[in-house]
Structure formats: C-alpha cells, structure tokens
Image: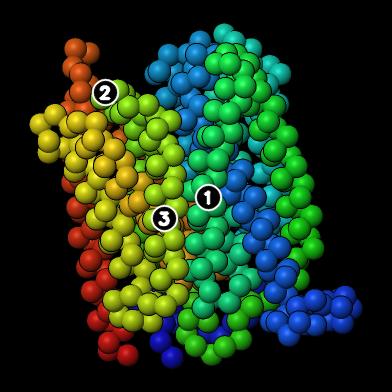
C-alpha cells in the first residue's frame, strides 16, 4: 500500500474522536439517503457542505475590506498609511493568531469554533459601529480590525476543512473545489454588495459605510447561527472517518504533531506560505494602486480577478482526484503550475519599460488565475500530506509565516514622490519574480523527489 513520500506510515482509518459513531433511530431507520439507495448520510454531508459555503462567504466579507478600504479611510479621516496599518492589523489577526482557531477546530470541533468566530467578529463590528465615529482614534480601529482578522481565521479553517473530514477522500479535490470557488466568488459577491450599497447611497461615503456595517452585522449573525445549528445536526458525521476502502488514498498518516513538523513537506509548505502566499496577500491590498497608475479602477479589476480566481481553484482541485495516483499528478504538479502562472503575471509588470493598461489587465488575469490555483490546492494538499488529526494547528502554524512576510512585502511597495507609472514599483515586482522563481524550483525538486519515491514502491 503506497502513501505520500515523506509522510508517516499509512494506517487504516480510525475515528477522529477516538470512539465509534452512535447512530440515532432517525439516522438508522428514517434516513432519506438510505431510502433512495444512496451512500449513508449523503444528504447530511451535502447540508454540511452548504453550511461551510456560508462560512467562506463570511470569510469573503472580511477580505472585501481590500475593495472598500479607501472609502473607510475617507469615512474615518485616515491617511493611506494609516489604512495600510489597519490592514496589517487585520492580517496579523488572520495569520499570526491562526493557530488558535486551528487548535479550536481540532480540539473543540466545528460548532464551537464557528460560535467563537462569530462572537469575535461581532465584538469588533459592534465596537466599530457604535463607538468608532468619524475621526475615531487609531487604537480603537486597530482593535476592530484585529478582531476581524482573527474571526476570519475561524471562518477559513472551519469552511475549508470540515467538509474534507466527512467526505470520502477520493472526492477530496471536488469537495475542496466547491468550497474554494465559493471562497473566491465570496470575495467578489461581498465586494459587489458593498458597491450596491454605495450606489443606493448615491455615492455618499458616510451612508455607504454605515449601511455596509449594518449589513455585515446582520449577515454574520444569521449565517453564524445557521451554521452552528447545522453542525449540531451533522455532529455524527465527525465521529468517524467516512472512508472504509483500503486504497492508500483513503488512509491517513499516523504522525504526532512533533513528527509532522519535522517532515520535509512541512518545511516546504512553510517556505511556500512565507514567500508566495505572503506576497499574494500583500498584492491584493496594493494592486488597485498599481492599476491607478494607468487609470484603471480597482472595481474593474476585482470582478475579473474574482472569476479567474475561482477558475484557478477549480482547475487544480478537481483534476487532483483523477491524477493524484500518477507519479507526476500529485499536489506538487498543481503547485508548480500555479506558481508559474502567477509569476508570469507579475513579470508583465517588470520587463516592459513602461507597462500599459493592457498589460496590467493581462497581469491581473494571470495573477488571479495563479492565485486561485495556489490557494485552491492548499487544503487538499495539506490533508493528503498530514492527515486530519492536527490539520487545523498545522494550517495555523503555516500562516504565522504569512504574518511575518506580508509586512516585509509591504515595505518593498514604495516609490519616489515624483515618480508616476507602474515602473515605479519595479523593486517590489522584481523581488516577487525572484522569490517565485526560487519557490518554483523548489516545487519542481519536491515533485521529482515524490515521483522517484512513488516509482520505487
């Protein structure tokens, strides 16, 4: 029986909670799935998947701040530098503290994690809505944005990994694709919601910001309550692994957390998060300013980015189910392809002496597609390599690297006061191309190493 190279010994599936699932009378005798001759708990799994889609829509609400940020700066009378500081606080909460939501997910379960995430989001949002009037102090806003980022980690972890625990691993890519597409489109949908509210407010920044805060509060609480109820209904699904087939793809590596952190795969993913994902998060915050150098609005880029982001996630997650048993068809192949596409997009902002608006549009398309592939392959890849027992904690630890690197990339995003044009940011874009080239070379090396290990078994 084969297993992923570098992982611990492949063992048979065991209950996540350490105890067998106890079926209720309703589950055993009144199951609609059983009556229709489907796999047991099919409809509960689909219901849980729907709930997790709502979780990533909540996550998209937080990330939509990158689109509405300029209006919020105007509303609170902040400079661009102060706005960037708030964005850094949000990233700190989402990344540096992500191991806490991961630990809650692994130890307390999805229901409690979702409850805590909604509560933390409410704390920041209510404080911002009631106490933070125009001209508010930075410390109060910093607390709010720290809460938003911290809450988004709960939504992210629960939304991405809960479905992967309850569906057979032969469908891991397709299930993850569904979640990842909704996550991508969630950012776009929440951005569109803000623009619609702004249009309804007839362009008034004050009214549009106030309306969006009320909308966010209502959406978050309705969604959070619904999800907690659904997780309780689907509780039995988490009591045991859903897989009973003997194929290695259906097994989980039996590793302690300490042993997992010493594997070459974990070292690789640590570098990937530090270099590539750290840059991508920073780029989302500054792309609109790069576009403004050639008179392109952030709104026009956001829609295209969201759609291509979703396509990128589908293009890596769905094929993974059908190619992962091939020596060159595993997660590293899709990681390499995503890194290459992303790097080509940034290259269009480097080598033309004066990048035009057309080149910025093409760069946005390539970066959106590559970004989607990069972020889309991460959940199934981590599940395949590390199993589900410590998955939330591992995910959170990896994001600590993003919290360190994202501000560093932000420091590189600067230009001379009298400089105009995309070329003013050449230091920033060139550094990205070099970092992605290093990461691409390392990914190819890991791919060849994995292929060689598979061929020898």
Mark 1: few, some, or many residues within 10 Å (few <14, many ≥20)?
many
Indicate left or right for 171 with 361 as reference.
Answer: right
Q: On the image, which quarter does residue 208 sit in? A: top right
User: Which residue matches tag 3?
Assistant: 311
Q: Secondary structure at mark 3?
A: helix
* Foreground label between 3 and 1: 3
Q: Earlier in the sequence, mark 2 or mark 1?
A: 1
Q: Earlier in the sequence, mark 3 or mark 2?
A: 2
Q: Secondary structure at mark 1?
A: helix
Q: On the image, which quarter does residue 300 sit in? A: top left
Mark 3: few, some, or many residues within 10 Å (few <14, many ≥20)?
many
The image position of residue 30, as x and y in percent, is: 87, 78
Q: Secondary structure at mark 2?
A: loop
The image position of residue 285, as x and y in percent, is: 40, 32
Q: On the image, which quarter does residue 293 sit in? A: top left
Q: CA distance from mark 2 to mark 1?
A: 29 Å
Q: Earlier in the sequence, mark 3 or mark 1?
A: 1
Mark 2: few, some, or many residues within 10 Å (few <14, many ≥20)?
some
Q: Mark 3 and mark 1 in contact? Answer it, CB < 8 Å.
A: no
Marking on residue 399: none
Residue drawn at x 53%, y 50% as measured from the top left: 183
Q: CA distance from mark 3 to mark 1?
A: 12 Å
Residue drawn at x 54%, y 24% as measured from the top left: 142
Residue drawn at x 61%, y 72% as measured from the top left: 167
User: Which residue matches tag 2?
Assistant: 293
Please say whether residue 334 is visible from this viewpoint: yes
The image position of residue 439, as x and y in percent, is: 25, 55
User: Which residue matches tag 1?
Assistant: 183
| Nearer to the camera, 369 or 118 | 369
């Amino acid at each position: 029986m084969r297993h992923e190279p570098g992982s611990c010994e492949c063992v048979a599936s065991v209950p996540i909670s350490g105890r067998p699932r106890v079926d209720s009378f309703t589950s055993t005798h009144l199951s609609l799935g059983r009556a229709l001759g489907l796999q047991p708990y099919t409809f509960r799994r689909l219901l849980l998947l729907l709930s997790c889609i709502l979780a990533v829509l909540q996550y998209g609400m937080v990330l939509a701040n990158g689109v509405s940020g300029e209006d919020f700066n105007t509303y609170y009378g902040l400079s661009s530098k102060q706005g960037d500081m708030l964005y850094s606080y949000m990233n700190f909460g989402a990344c540096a503290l992500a191991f806490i939501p991961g630990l809650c997910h692994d130890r307390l379960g999805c229901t409690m994690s979702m409850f805590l995430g909604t509560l933390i989001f409410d704390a920041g949002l209510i404080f911002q809505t009631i106490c933070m009037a125009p001209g508010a102090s930075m410390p109060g806003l910093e607390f709010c944005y720290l809460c938003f980022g911290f809450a988004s980690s709960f939504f992210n972890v629960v939304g991405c990994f809960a479905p992967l625990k309850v569906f057979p691993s032969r469908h891991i890519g397709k299930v993850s694709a569904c979640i990842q597409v909704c996550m991508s489109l969630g950012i776009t949908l929440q951005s569109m919601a803000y623009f619609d509210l702004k249009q309804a407010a007839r362009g008034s920044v004050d009214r549009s910001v106030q309306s969006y805060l009320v909308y966010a509060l209502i959406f978050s609480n309705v969604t959070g309550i619904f999800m907690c109820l659904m997780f309780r209904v689907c509780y039995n699904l988490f009591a045991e692994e859903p897989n009973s087939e003997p194929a290695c793809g259906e097994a989980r590596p039996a590793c302690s957390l300490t042993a997992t952190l010493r594997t070459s795969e974990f070292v690789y993913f640590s570098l990937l998060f530090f270099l590539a994902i750290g840059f991508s998060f920073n780029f989302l915050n500054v792309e609109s300013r790069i576009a403004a150098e050639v008179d392109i609005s952030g709104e026009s880029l956001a829609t295209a980015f969201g759609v291509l982001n979703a396509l990128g996630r589908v293009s890596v997650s769905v094929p993974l189910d059908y190619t992962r048993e091939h020596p060159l068809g595993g997660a590293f192949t899709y990681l390499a392809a995503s890194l290459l596409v992303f790097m080509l997009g940034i290259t269009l902002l480097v080598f033309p002496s004066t990048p035009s608006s057309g080149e910025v549009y093409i760069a946005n398309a390539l970066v959106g597609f590559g970004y989607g592939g990069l972020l889309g392959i991460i959940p199934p890849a981590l599940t395949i390599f590390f199993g589900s027992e410590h998955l939330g904690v591992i995910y959170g630890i990896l994001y600590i690297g993003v919290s360190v690197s994202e501000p560093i990339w932000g420091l590189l995003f600067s230009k001379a006061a009298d400089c105009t044009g995309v070329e003013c940011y050449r230091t920033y874009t060139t550094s990205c191309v070099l970092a992605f080239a290093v990461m691409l070379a390392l990914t190819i090396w890991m791919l060849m190493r994995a292929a060689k290990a598979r061929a020898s078994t």
